[in-house]
Amino acid sequence: MIWKLAFRNIWRNKRRTLITSASVMFAGFLTITMSSIETGMWEKMLQNVIDQTTGQVQIQSKKFFDEPTLDNSFAFSESEFKKVSQIKHVTAVNPRIESFSLASFGEKTKPVYIIGVNPDLEDVMTALKKRVVKGGYLGTQKGSGILLGVNLAKNLNILLGDSLAFFGQGYRGVFSVGMLPVKGFVKFPLEDMNNQMVYMNQIDAWELFQAPELYTQLMIRTKSNKYTDPVKNEIKENIKNDELKVYGWKELIPELVEAKEMDESTTVITMSILYLVVSFGIFGTLLMLINERRHEMGVLLAIGMKKRQLMGIVWLEFWLIAILGLTMAMILSLCITTYLKWFPVPLTGMEEVYEQFGFEAVMTATVSLKIFITELIKVTLIVSILSLFPVWKIYTLQPLDALRS
C-alpha cells in the first residue's frame, strides 16, 4: 500500500516531481562531468608525454638518469632486444640515442635536442609519421634528412631542402659536427617539443655523435599503463645486466605525477564547494515539496493516518524521485563524456596558456565506471542525509497547525 501511494503521489503533481528530480539530476550530472573532464585532460597530457618521450617502461644506463650524457649510453644486443619484445603486454620497443647540440642556419643558432631513431620502430611507438605537417618522413639510409619541430623551423627561418649544421659534444668528449638536409616539419601537442626537437635516423646520429650502435634509452610501450609494473619486473628478470636500470613512467616524469597529485588536492576543495551548492539546491526543492503539502499532510493525520506511515510514504516518494534524477544524470553524463572523449572540443584562443603547462588546448573527458560510481555514491549520500529533513518535519508536524496553513 505504501509503495502504491508513493508512486501515485509522484505523478499527481508532475511539475513538482520534475523540479525535484531535475535538482538531483543537475547535482549528479555536474559532479560526474567535472570529474570526468579533469581526469580526461590529465590522462591525455600524461599519455602525450608517455607516448612521445618516455614510454611506459624504459631501459637506461644506471648513471644516465642522474647524468643524461652520451658518455652514459649503452649497447643492447639483438638477442636482448628480442627478449624484451616477446614479453607479454609489450606492444612496441624503440631504441633511441638522444643528446643536446647547437644547430646553425645562416646567421641563426639555436640549442636543439637531437633524437636518433629507427624510423620504422619510432613510427610504431609514437606515430611520428602522422605528425609530419610538411615535407616527408625520415628515411633509413645515411644522410636521408632530418625532421624539425615547427617552431624551431620558424625560428631558424629554414625551408625544406635547406641543410642544417650541427656542432656540440659527442661520445667520450669528441667534438661532433655535421650537416644534414631538412626533410620535413613535425608538430607535437607539447610546445616544448615544437621548440627544440630534431629527429634523424640512428645511422646519422651515430655518425654525428661518433657513438656507433649505442643507445641512451630503450623505450617500451605496453598495452596499457596498468601493465607498467608487471612488464618492468619481467624485464629485470630476463635482462641480467648490472650496468642497466629499468624505470617505470612515474619514475621518469615525477614532476608531472606530483603536479597531478597537487591538482587533485585542490580539486577536493573545489568539489566540496560544488557538493555544498548542489546540497542547497536539493534542499530548496525538498523545502518546497514539504511546504506545498503541509495542509494535505495535516488532513491525512487528522483522519487517522499514523505519522510513521506518512513518513514512510514521503521518504519513499523522495527516493523514487531521486532515483529518477540520478538515472537521468548518468545517461546525460555518459552522452557528454563519450562525445568529449571521441571528439575533443578545441579551446580556441587559449592555446598559448594551455601549452605553457604542457596541455593540449582541447577539452576532453574520460569515460570511467569508477568515476560514475564514486560520484553517484557521493550524491546518493547527500540525498540520504537530506531525505531525513521531510521525515523530521512530519515527525514534528502538528495536525491542527497544518490544517490552518
Image: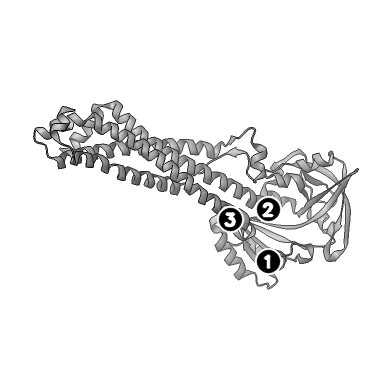
- Depth check, mark 2 against mark 1: the one in front is 2
Q: Secondary structure at mark 1?
A: helix
Left/right of residue 177 with respect to residue 21 in the rendered view = right
Depth-wise, is mark 3 or mark 1 nearer the camera? 3
How many C-alpha atoms fall within 10 Å of the one at disc 2: few (<14), some, or many (≥20)? some
**How far across and how far down the image is residue 243, in percent?**
70, 71
Amino acid identity at mark 3: Glu
Residue shown at 68%/72% (left/top)?
Answer: 241
Q: Nearer the viewer, residue 63 or 338?
A: 63
Count neighbours of disc 1 (C-alpha within 10 A) and say few if under 14, some if 14 to 19, many if 20 or more.
few
Name the residue at 79% across, 62% down: 70
Horizontal side of residue 361 vs 112, given as left or right: left
**Could you say where residue 223 lies in the image, as x and y percent from the top left?**
57, 54
SS for tag 3? helix
Q: Nearer the viewer, residue 154 or 205?
A: 154
Q: Amino acid at mark 1?
A: Glu
Q: Quadrant of the N terminus?
A: top left
Q: CA distance from mark 3 to mark 1?
A: 33 Å
Name which residue lies at 26% across and 41% down: 389
> Are circles 2 and 1 on residues that touch, CB within 8 Å?
no
Tag 1 residue: 80
Please give the residue where the numbered disc 2 appears in the rendered image.
53
Residue 328 visible from this viewpoint: no
Q: Which residue is mark 3?
A: 258
